[in-house]
Amino acid sequence: MNKPILCAAAAALLFAIADSASAAPTVVFVDVDKMSDVPHGLRERENMEFLFREHIGILAGKLPPGQTLKVEFLDIDLAGDEFPRVAVRDVRVLKGRADWPRLHLRYSVEQDGRVVRSGERKLANPNYLMSANRYGSDLYSHEKQMLDDWFHQDIQPRR
């Protein structure tokens, strides 16, 4: 590969990283200890928060330049129910009954310091095991799918 093409590719990559970094979202988990159903272990809870922040970051990257997304998770009820297992770790079992995922969030989209869109939503998917899910067996796949649907409906409606 010749040097000018390599330099151009590196510059494009750095520009893409810098561009996406400028739209970093703010994600807050309000009073996690009082949420309906989050992992019990500190490491598992931190992992859940990390994965939700990462997913919100991916969605926020789809916003027009100059817009920033702020999301507050007010309550989380993950898909399935957690059952204690021997000392190793708890197991989450998905039955498709009254164990569907629910998310309660407050959000705003700002541009140039001005709120252009905001609201509060309670998301739920009672048919979570029967609907298509693009995340397959990813951890928190059903919650990610609900966040995608919310983003496309409330934040970035399709034209």
Image (tube, rainbow, N blue to C red):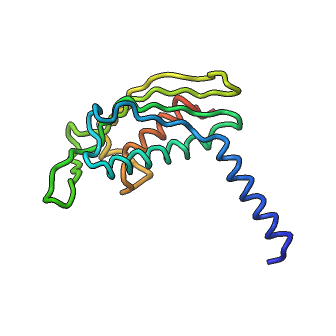
- Left or right, 135 with respect to 20, comes to left
- Give the answer, above or below, for where 147 lies relative to 16: above
- Furthest toward the right, the residue is 4
- Furthest toward the bottom, the residue is 1
Q: Tell which of 130 and 61 is nearer to you.
A: 61
- Give the answer, above or below, for where 101 lies relative to 132: above
Q: Tell which of 143 and 15 is nearer to you.
A: 15
Q: Which quadrant is home to the N terminus? A: bottom right
Name the residue: 45% across, 23% down.
Answer: 120
- Give the answer, above or below, for where 48 lies relative to 27: below
Percent position (x, y) of residue 67? 66, 33
Name the residue: 81% across, 63% down.
Answer: 8
Name the residue: 60% across, 41% down.
Answer: 24
- Give the answer, above or below, for where 3 lies relative to 84: below
Percent position (x, y) of residue 5? 82, 69
Name the residue: 43% across, 44% down.
Answer: 145
Q: Which quadrant is home to the C terminus? A: top right
Percent position (x, y) of residue 11? 78, 60
Percent position (x, y) of residue 65? 71, 38
